[in-house]
Amino acid sequence: MPRSRVRSKPTADGTAPEAYRPPLSVSRPEVLIDGSDDRFRDLIYTLFVTGSRFQEIREAFGREVDVSGPQYFVLMAVARHHGDGGIGIGGLSGHLHVAAPHVTTEVGKLVDRGLLAKRPNPEDGRRVLVTLTEAGKAVLDRLAPFRQHINNVLFDGFSREEFLTLARLLDRFLSTTERALDEVADHERDRRRTQTQGAQAAE
């Protein structure tokens, strides 16, 4: 597989260091350009930066109404299902792609703040449904103009086709990133097992 040539700069003593290029970070031909992973690496860095900026925006939305960023996400998720009679903890966990105990903790804080309410699920008395309170609705109504302005800026210049394409691609990334994390967990579990076996053999 061809690699782009790397021109080495002289070192302080005037000698040329050995040219080096790190191993390819991906082997799928679909994402290699002329055998190079440079564009792939640029994309990964862009995704990291974009994710960080989205998180900062989420935190700003939360600060605007005096809640944390994760609590803002919970409020919006509950609002989306408020008209359906509420949403359960499991539903919130799946919608937000976070663990149910974390959702339970954040919902509890928002209930204490008077922004959310819990009631028994009529289909299963062991579970609860979460809804907005009037105060919760007021908070989201107050945030709406700022949120709309920022989101309009985020998608400035996007065509409808580009927006829908981006949405489809990110939906796919939700699946592939989950699979990648599973692979990471398997790898780290195997590595710990190997390290433990090595340590026991050395005793």
Image: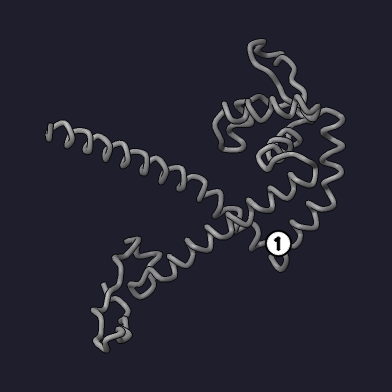
Q: Is residue 92 left or right of residue 5?
A: right
Q: Residue at x 69, y 28 (%)?
A: 107
Image location (x, y in percent) of residue 132: 79, 29
Question: Which is more toward the observer, 122 or 98?
Answer: 98
10 Å crowding of disc 1: few (<14), some (14-19), many (20+): few
* Quarter of the figure that contains the N terminus: bottom left
Q: Residue furthest top?
A: 125
Question: Which is more toward the observer, 189 or 16?
Answer: 16
Question: Which is more toward the observer, 41 or 201?
Answer: 201
Image location (x, y in percent) of residue 17: 25, 80
Image location (x, y in percent) of residue 105: 63, 27
Q: Residue at x 66, y 24 (%)?
A: 88
Q: Is residue 145 left or right of residue 174?
A: right
Task: Examine the rendered structure and indicate whether residue 16 appears above or below residue 71.
Answer: below
Where does label 1 land, which residue? 155
Q: Residue at x 32, y 65 (%)?
A: 24
* Quarter of the figure that contains the C terminus: top left
